[in-house]
Image (cartoon, rainbow, N blue to C red):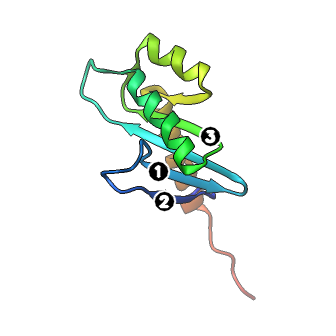
Amino acid sequence: RSQGYNVEVTSPSGDFGGDLILKKGKEKSVVQAKRYGEDKKVGVYAINEVVGAAGYYNATKKIVITNRYYTDAAKITGKRNGVTLLDRDDLVRMLNQYNDARIRFSKQKEPIDI
């Protein structure tokens, strides 16, 4: 939302493979989020889910994001299906950028009306 997206959270069950629908201008993205414990990698099924969800929601972009990493097969399948794969390193980088921007914004002084 802080980057100008209208965000819709899909229902926990029957989401057709999408957890979030992001809209910004004419762009509509479907996001599949996967959270796993240590040493587990996200496989091809997550890519298949978001590809199916993109068709159902008529999305122009497909994204899978995880707190872990992807299998080699998932990376290949994602690339061939135009799916953006964001892994743990990407997630940490995005959170750091968001937090840095919040800190910069909070340090700005309010303008004084004269």
Q: Residue at left 69%, top 76%?
A: 111
Q: Residues within 10 Å of mark 1 (few under 14, many from 20)?
A: some
Mark before the other along the chain sequence, 2 or 1: 2
Q: Quadrant of the N terminus?
A: bottom right
Mark 2 surroundings: few (<14), some (14-19) or many (≥20) residues within 10 A: few
Query: The residue tagged with tag 2: helix, strand or loop?
Result: strand
> Percent x, y for residue 63?
53, 36
Residues at badges 2 and 1 in contact (C-beta under 8 Å)?
A: yes
The residue beneath circle 1 is 20
Residue 3 in sight from this viewpoint:
no
**Residue in front for this viewpoint, 16 or 71:** 16
Q: Is residue 11 above or below residue 43?
A: below
Q: Secondary structure at mark 1?
A: strand
Q: Residues within 10 Å of mark 3 (few under 14, many from 20)?
A: some
Name which residue type carries label 1: Leu
Q: Position of residue 108 (x, y in %)?
A: 62, 63
Q: Quadrant of the C terminus?
A: bottom right
Q: Amino acid at mark 2?
A: Glu
Q: Report which residue position mark 3 lands on.
A: 61
Q: Amino acid at mark 3?
A: Lys
Q: Nearer the viewer, residue 5 or 104?
A: 5
Q: Residue furthest right?
A: 114
Above or below, 86 relative to 13? above
Q: What residue is rendered at 37% in x and 32% in y?
A: 67
Tell which circle, 3 or 1, labels the residue nearer the N-terminal end.
Answer: 1
- Name the mark on residue 8: 2
